[in-house]
Amino acid sequence: MGRHSNNDRSRRRRPIGPSRVQNGTSASEPANGSREVHPTASDATFEAYAARQPAKRKRGRLWFIAGGVVLVLIVTGCVAWTKNVFNPVLPAAAWAQTCTPTQLRVVADPSIAAALRASAKGFDATTPCVHTSVTSQKSADTASALAVGGDIKADVWIPDSPAWEPRMQVLSWSLIRRAPVAEFGRSIASSPLVFATPSKNADAFDGSSLNWNTIGDGDTPVLLPEPAQNGSSLAALAEIKATADSRDDLAFSRDMIELSKTIPATVPDAFADAERASAPTVVVTTEQSVVAQNESSPSHQFFALYPSDGTVSVSYPYVRVAGTTTGDATKDQLISALERQFRSDSRTLARAGFRTADGEGFAAKGVVANPPKTSAALDGGAQVGILESWSSITVRSRMLVVVDTSGSMDEDADGRSRIDVFEDAASGMLQLLPPQTEMGVWTFSTDQSGTQPWAQRSPIASLDDPAHASDVSQVFGSLSTMVAGDTGLYDTVLAAVKDVKQGYDPHRINYVLVVTDGRNENPAGGLSLTSLVSQLKALNDPKKPVPVIMVGMGPDTDVSAMSQIANATVGAVYTAEQPQDITNVLVDALQQRTCRPYCS
């Protein structure tokens, strides 16, 4: 290995002969100061070699540059390919020029639609070949359309409550339709329930401890937007019931009747009513609604007052309208990606007044930054049952109240006469009824109008008319002056049913409420029980029902006869053996007047 051939030694030999001088420098010492070794050669050969060197070095530089460019292109291509596989490098606008975008359609409750529309723009900007549209529609309208099998023209629905799932199912079953296949998933946002009041009323509630019993004590006027149309109001109704049930069995019914006196159709309507109210009033609504109100109306600001006994959080679920899959794998992946976008876009949701699905806090005018003490809302199935109770209380009614003024109503009932006890209860009932109720009043005993055992004291008309409401109130307040005679019950019941049927209103619950303390006694003869029941059955029309609700006062009532009358009209029988029972009996009768014969 240490030995070399002669040729190797000759190649290592330094050049002989005089050095050539070019441009004042030695040929063996380049101008840049570096030392250059040339191969052994003659002068002519050397000159030829030297002449070739510039061209050779130029080609080397070109090859080097070309190689670098190729290397850069290869690396860039690899990076671009990698990003294209795992994260698109082209903006959505660029992709839209090279593909047909997948259309994602979202229908959202109006309270959250604007926020989702902004979030969807961000989703489209970072996701290739997709276009997302967000349409605003009331949750009640969307639920109704789905329940009847309609096409809401959407892939995703964001309602204002998970309770719409069982509500849709109940509606579908009632219409003998298959339940919708919509899949209710996790929530993307939440908002706690609060009591909202105009800022001008801040001093009125300063230091006060508002809680869910506020609804029942009657000291604070309360507005609850229609629960049948508003998911947060239904959740609030469930919270009101939980508190009321701890007081007594009929407390919730009384609370609902109190709330039903004024039912704003929407949250904005409730805010407007609270602003106009003469007394400091609160609106039961969501924290988000307060934020939205304050953003839209700088001159009408509201404060969110948080219940001292805690509150519930209303959530907005992500609902896949077609169920778990649309049948299009690409679209299904995009629907899942959109769900992640909505749930993670907390900044956009916060700007609209929403907390995250986990209730994380945010800063906004009129609300607290830190999350209040909250619990999950009552499950949807339980809320459906509560809604049925609410509907039975608030449904518009057309009623004829028929009051026994026979001599026995003047008998003692724990220190007062029976008629005095009923007068007070009737006045309280009148205060509980919604003003849209239509009511008339008859009295009965014997010989009220000739031999006729009944007399009309006030015709059936709307209590919304102040003159009529005053007339009915005066009749109830003067019943004790009308007491005389026997009990012409059977003939009066038949006449009352015929009167209500004659003016039947298909848009209302039409019924007769009979209050009596005894049994039929008519010296003039009149109908027998058998004849009455037979005629009532003949008059009964399932398409135009007129149930008779019998209320017996005292221990002398003929419960058997009253039951037969009620059964013939698909009505009900109540008894109030103690004077203090009559108010609760009337409240319960009002609550259950729409569920006959299936009341629980």
Image (cartoon, grey):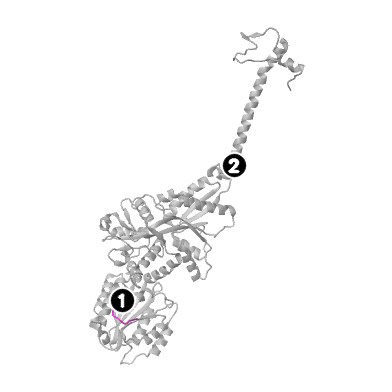
Could you tell me if residue 310 is visible in this image?
A: yes
Instruction: Rate crowding at label 1 as few (under 14), some (14 to 19) or many (20 or more) other CA atoms within 10 Å.
Output: some
Image-based side of 321 in relation to 383, left or right: right
Kind of residue at badge 2? Thr
Instruction: Rate crowding at label 2 as few (under 14), some (14 to 19) or many (20 or more) other CA atoms within 10 Å.
Output: few
Q: Position of residue 145 (x, y in %)?
A: 49, 63
Residue drawn at (40%, 56%) of the image = 191
Kind of residue at badge 1? Thr
Residue 577 magenta = yes
Vertical arrangement, residue 240 with respect to residue 65, above or below = below
Query: Residue tagged by mark 1?
Result: 583
Q: Which residues are magenta?
A: 575-584
Residue drawn at (29%, 67%) of the image = 217
Q: Quadrant of the N terminus?
A: top right
Q: Earlier in the sequence, mark 2 or mark 1?
A: 2
Which circle, 2 or 1, is nearer the viewer? 2
Residue drawn at (48%, 47%) of the image = 122
Task: Identify the secondary structure beneath mark 2.
Answer: helix
Q: Which one is in front, 20 or 74?
A: 20
Image-based side of 452 in relation to 392, left or right: left
Q: Examine the image and state in which quarter residue 30 appears.
A: top right
Query: Residue tagged by mark 2?
Result: 82
Could you tell me if residue 459 is visible in this image?
A: no
Task: Identify the secondary structure beneath mark 1.
Answer: helix
